Amino acid sequence: MFHEYRDIIVKIKAQDKYFEKLFDKHNEMDEEIVQLEKNHADQFEIEKKKKEKLKLKDDIHTAILKYKKDNNL
């Protein structure tokens, strides 16, 4: 996710614990969704998790864009 921002993500994670938690939670949810799909879990539950993960991704992207703007990148 956001491979083009890898360097920026490392910098933000080092400075912002909230961002780090968002990023880690996104990765955890990714793994959780994979497991749910492997176990043929309820589609509604999977879709709910995917929406939560997408919200986290949007929040992460917003933080990256803010960091870029604030640091003239």
Image (cartoon, rainbow, N blue to C red):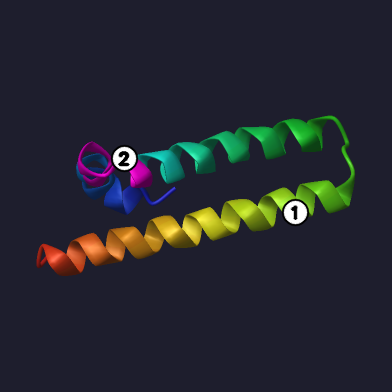
Instruction: From this view, report whether residue 29 is shown above or below residue 47.
Output: above
Amino acid bearing label 2: Lys
| Residue at 52% in and 43% down | 26
Q: Position of residue 29 (x, y in %)?
A: 61, 39
Residue 27 % position (x, y): 52, 37
Reading the image, the residue beneath label 1 is 48
62 above or below 33?
below
Helix, strand or loop at label 1? It is helix
Pick the front one: 58 or 15: 15
Residue at image x 24%, y 46%?
12
Height in image: 11 above or below 72? above
**Of helix, strand and loop, which mostly describes the magenta segment?**
helix
| Left or right of 49 in this view: 38 | right
Image position of 19 with respect to 62: above or below: above
Residue corresponding to mark 2: 17
Counting from the top left corner in percent of width and height, residue 1 is at 44, 48
Whether 73 is among the magenta residues is no
Q: Residue at x 9, y 67 (%)?
A: 72
Q: Are marks 1 and 2 in contact (CB under 8 Å)?
A: no
Q: Which residues are magenta?
A: 12-19
Viewer-nearest of labels 1 and 2? 2
Specify which label sits upstream in the sequence, 1 or 2. 2
Task: Residue at 19%, 63% (x, y): give it.
Answer: 68
Mark 1 to mark 2 CA distance (whole Å) = 26 Å
Q: Is residue 57 left or right of residue 43?
A: left
In this view, the residue farthest toward the left is: 72
Q: Quadrant of residue 34?
A: top right
Residue 73, image x, y percentages: 13, 64
The amino acid type found where label 1 is placed reads Lys
Question: Element under label 2?
Answer: helix
How packed is label 2: few (under 14 Cα within 10 Å), some, or many (20 or more)? Answer: few
